[in-house]
Image: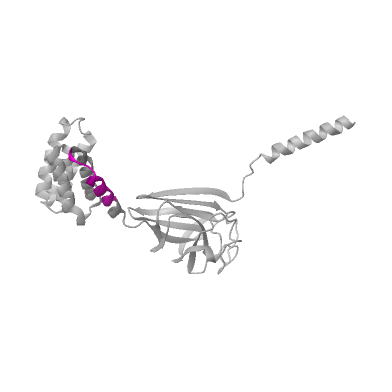
Amino acid sequence: MKNIIKFAVVVSLFSIGIAAQVQLPRESQRQEVVQTVGDATIRVVYHRPNVKGRKIWDGLVPYGKVWRAGANEATLFEFSRDVTVNGQPLPAGKYSFHVIPESREWTLIFNKDDGQWGSFSYDAAKDALRVRSSIEKALFTESLTYTFGKVDPDGVDVYLIWENVQVPFRIGIGNIHGRILSQIREGLAGKTGAERVPLLNQFANYVATFKLKDHLDEALTNIDASIAARETFSNNYTKARLMAEKGNYREAVRLGEKALEMGPAATPPANPNFLDLIRTTVAEWKAKM
């Protein structure tokens, strides 16, 4: 009998050990969303409560009180570089995200204590930034959602959406074009001869792609230096794009057609789809002459 009891105890303890290893799902599921903007990465980690037929605003979530902006652990925002939120500066790092909801406008809070459970231990003295944001009507959304909207080279719109409300705010990354061009200039300063050509092309291509009119003359100087070192269909087309940005469509067409002539004989030959794109672009320039 004693042996049977001992065996039962051992089996029971073994079963408890196995059960302790089972990862049980949470009612409010975890989600992580990441967005790259220029040279920055924005990461949001949060848990998604459901409406479940409840009154959310000024009900489950009271007006005028700090809320974790999710469920379980406080929502986390992480920025790989310094940013702005609705135009206000916020250093790179991890932050717990809290809000104070109201009927028309919310307070958004980025707090330096990024490891807290909910907002129960929230300490306003650790706030890194508070900004205000107006709320908007939204289509009904059962599960709390954070989503990224319009993405520009220098920022992105972020939305907190739940039930029939959405709260938009803008995260900016500053003068991305200025930073990139400065980095290329620094690289050029340390190169000589043929080593400079890839960076010369990179600078000119960047200016042409983003239509940076304030830097057109510098880009033309760089692409002329590239052509002088070694003329290719690629640098001719880059210069054509720059000339088009300056409004000199006649010269843009001449250089574009020259690029089309050189493309098939290039090493390796230019991609046929890319050549078709150049033909279409040249036709558009001709229409503007």
The residue depicted at 27 percent of the width and 52 percent of the height is: 182
Is residue 183 on the magenta stretch? yes
Query: Which residues lie in the magenta part?
Result: 180-193
Q: Where residue 197 sits in the image (x, y, percent)?
A: 20, 40
Residue 121 lies left or right of residue 190; in this view the side is right
Quarter in which the N terminus is drawn: top right
Residue 86 visible within the image: no
Q: How is the image coloured?
A: one colour
Q: Where residue 133 sits in the image (x, y, percent)?
A: 44, 65
Residue 88 lies left or right of residue 268; in this view the side is right
Magenta span dominant secondary structure: helix
As drawn, 235 above or below 45: above
As drawn, 284 above or below 12: below
**Residue 289 or residue 17, whichever sits in front:** 17
The residue depicted at 42 percent of the width and 51 percent of the height is: 80
As drawn, 84 above or below 219: below
Residue 229 lies left or right of residue 28; in this view the side is left
